[in-house]
Structures are given as C-alpha cells and as structure tokens.
Amino acid sequence: MSFSAEEPTTDTNQPLKKRSPSWSDLWLKNTKPLKHVIFAMQLQSLSSPTPNKESKTKTQTLIPKFSKIDRTLLLSDELLLKILSKLTDSHRNHNFLVCKRWLNLQGRLVRSLKVLDWEFIESGRLIARFPNLTNVDLINGCIVTPHNSSIWLNHRFLSMNINFEISGFVPNWRICEENLLPVEVVDRGLQALASACPNLRKLIVIGASELGLLSVAEECLTLQELELHKCNDNVLRGIAACDNLQILKLVGNVDGLYRSLVSDIGLTILAQGCKRLVKLELSGCEGSFDGIKAIGQCCQMLEEFTLCDHRMDDGWLAALSYCENLKTLRFLSCMKIDPNPGPDEYLVSCPALEKLHLQKCQFRDKKSVRALFKVCEAVREIVVKDCWGLDNDMFSSASICRRVKLLSLEGCSLLTTQGLESILLTSNELQHLRVQSCKHIKDCEVSVTLSTLFSSLKEFKWRPDTKSLLVSSLVGTGMGKKGGKFFKKS
C-alpha cells in the first residue's frame, strides 16, 4: 500500500476565507483594554484564600489591595507641589500627616516661620525641613526662658517666662537682656540661615552683632525687610551692606527689657548704606537734628517714617523738612514731641507729606504741638488716638493745616465742642470726619453752622460720648431702671 503526496490545489474562482483572529493577535495588537482586566485578576488571585499544609485557610497578601494603593505616587513632586499650593492654609497645615513624602513637600511650601527653639537652627533641621523660607522671626528663639516659672510676660513683640525669684519691678530691671543667647551663638545661627536661604526677604532678630548681619547681607541679596531689636551703632555697620533693603525697624531701648543705644552715629551709617529705604521705624532710639537730616538727604525714597518712644534731642523736628518725598509721619507712645523746636524760620513744611498719625502720645506744651503742625502744614489726613493732654488751646494749632480732607479724633478727653468747631470751620476741603470717645464733646453744644457742615461730608462718624450711646441703645428694653421690671413682688 503506497501513499503519494499531492500538492494542494486552489480554486481561483472561490474567495479566500478569513481566518478568525487568535488570542495572540489580540494580545499583540490591542493590549490597552486588557490591562485593567488582567491587573484585577492578578489582585484577586493573589488575595484569594489558599489552604496550607495544616489544612487551614489564610489570606496571602503579596501586594496591597487596589483600593489602598497611593495613586499620588504616579504624580511627580513638581506637579503635586502645584496641587498642594492651591489649597487654603487651613487644609494645607495638616498635609504633613499623610506620609513622609507629603511631609517633605509641605516643608517646601512653607515661606514664613517663627522659630521658638534655637537648637532647631543649629542642628540643621530647620534648613532640611524648610528649604524655601523667605520670612523668618528669630526673636523668641534668641531668648532662653526658665520652664519652671509660672510667671508669663507678654510684650508687643515677644512672650516669655520670667524667673520666679524676681519679686517685683525695680528701676534697672532688664529681664530680657539677662536671658539672651550669647552674641556668638546668634551670629553662628545667622550664618547658617543665610547660607541655606539665599532668597530670604524678611528677617526679625534680637542680640545680633555686626558680623552676623554682614553674613546675611552678603548671602541674602534679595533681603528687603529687616527688624533689629537691641540694636546699637556698631550693629548698624552690618546692615549698611544691605543694598536692596526697603523696610527697616530699629529698636534700641525698651524699658524693663533691655538697653541699647542708637545715636546720630548709627543713623548716619544707616543713611549712607541703605539708600533705598521706603519705610523706617525708630523705636527707643536717640538722635538729633544731624541724624534725621542725614536720613532725609541720603534716603531720598523714604515715604513712611515712624517714631515710637523716641529719645531725640531738642530741635530735631526741623530736620524733617529734608525728607522731601515723605508721605506718612507717625508718632507712637512718645512721651514728648520736641520741647524746644527752635525759631519758626527753621521749621519748614514737608512738601509731600499727606498723613499725620498720633497715637498714645503726650502733649505737654503748646510750643511743640504748634511746631509739629507747622512742619506738617501740607497734610491731607490727621489721626489722633488716645493722646494725653490735647486740649482746645493745643488743638487750635491745627488750624494751619487748611488742606485736611480727613480728621479722626478718638480718646481726646480734654477736647470740647468749641475747640473742634474752631478747626472744622477753617478746613475748607474737609470730607471725612470721625469723632469717637471724646466725652467733653456734646451733641447739645453743636451749633447750626456745625450741623450744616456735617451734612455736606462724604463720611461722618459721630460717637463722642460712648456712655450716651449706650443709654440710647437701651431705650425700650427696661434695663437700667433699678430692676423694677425684673424684680416684682409676687
């Protein structure tokens, strides 16, 4: 029996039949729709219970369940940072609790920080945790406070525990100065901070020296705002290298906390070095005509000048005329203005001045108040709040300011309605008036002329007597009538 191999014959008249696609073709050509199915099948098989040798069932979990996979791992750090930066502060503050990656990313988003423990800087944790800081407050970190004391001191710029051995206040009491870190330690921390944060824009520090501030000036070229506490003339040599500094606050002496001296020497060094200053605040600083004159001549961009508890010598007020671009002048908690301002021919008005603010100051003589208003003759806004000693005679000096558009008086207990009227009738451009808590200004003493002036104002806030305001608000309630409404005999 023999077999012969015959060649297959094809009929050209019949069409070829299409072969059905195989599983391999589908797998090679279109794998996208099958990825999720296969992945789900793998998850199910890996997490399914399998019997062991002891005929007991247990769950094998080789990879986490699909629902517990961190899908943010698919996002890059840059993309996740953009998403986290869109959140509000209330939501963003808790992001570091998610995982270590979010902890590091959250630290990169922090721009402002208040340091409470100096060890946080020296250990390097501050730099590693927050590499992109632009605003740093070091005051509370520079003070070593006892932890076993129940006495707590709050000031405008710091909060600290006081040693319980201190029984009371004495004339030479300087509790903050006794608890400051050594100058070398503060300078070493500033050098580490400056080298790690070259984009620093604002810095607040106490007890630093010239060397520490020089390192900040050399490394942080974009530094724009600086606040120095316990500052002296030698320290100001360090900030003279801050070419781009625009906002500066100097605190020289604070009664009960520390003592330091800023005089004309330091003000002259400051003026020659920081010529781009726009805002300047001197708190507890000494000086005279020469120091203020140097600031006015060198810092030609200065627009806002604040003096807090100043210790200036007599005659300094006349130097304000050298600040040709000054727009805002503020006095805060000043025990005096200028007891001896000198002759009137030296008191030249500041040409660009627009705002004069006086808060918690003491007016002791008419001569100094008159000199102040003469220098501020061109102002458009006068705000007086909680100032002691301002009576009708002193306030009459404000009549020289005829271009005032806004007048705000609060807490002026010696000023009367007649004194207020004498000023308002000379202010032809007045548009805004606010009178609050001035108990000697009475509604019944307002004249017809004054009431007509009130009706033409754009803004009018009239609450001179808060006691009468309280009584009028209680009308109809029955309160304040000796309890007759609430305590009746049954």
Image: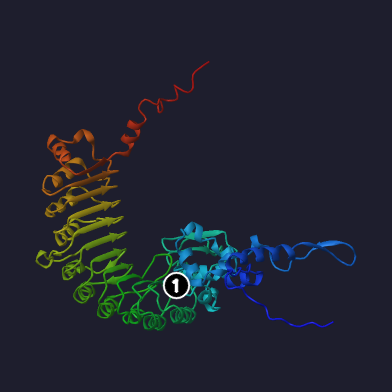
Badge 1: residue crowd in 10 Å (few <14, some 14–19, many ≥20): many
Q: Amino acid at mark 1?
A: Leu
Q: Quadrant of the N terminus?
A: bottom right
Residue at the image point whose x is 25% and y is 78% from the top: 268
Whether 386 is drawn above or below 92: the answer is above
In the image, what residue occupies the spot 38% across and 79% down?
A: 220
Asked whether 85 or 355 is in front, the reply is 85
Q: Position of residue 96 (x, y in %)?
A: 56, 65
Q: Residue furthest front?
A: 1
Residue 380 locus on image (x, y percent) = 17, 55
The reply, left or right, for residue 8 in relation to residue 33 is: right
Q: Find disc 1 in the rendering and name its residue.
A: 133
Residue 406 position, x and y percent, is 20, 50
Q: Is residue 75 above or below residue 457?
A: below
384 over 171 or under it: above or below: above
User: Colour scheme in the image?
Assistant: rainbow
**Can residue 150 be seen at all in this image of the molecule?**
yes
Q: Position of residue 41 (x, y in %)?
A: 69, 63
Residue 442 falls left or right of residue 426:
right
**Point 27% across, 73% down: residue:** 277
Q: Which secondary structure, mark 1?
A: loop
Q: Which image quadrant for residue 469? A: top left
Is residue 214 or residue 148 the one in the foreground?
A: 214
Q: Is residue 337 visible?
A: no
Taking the view exactly as shown, the residue that stands out farthest to the left is 345
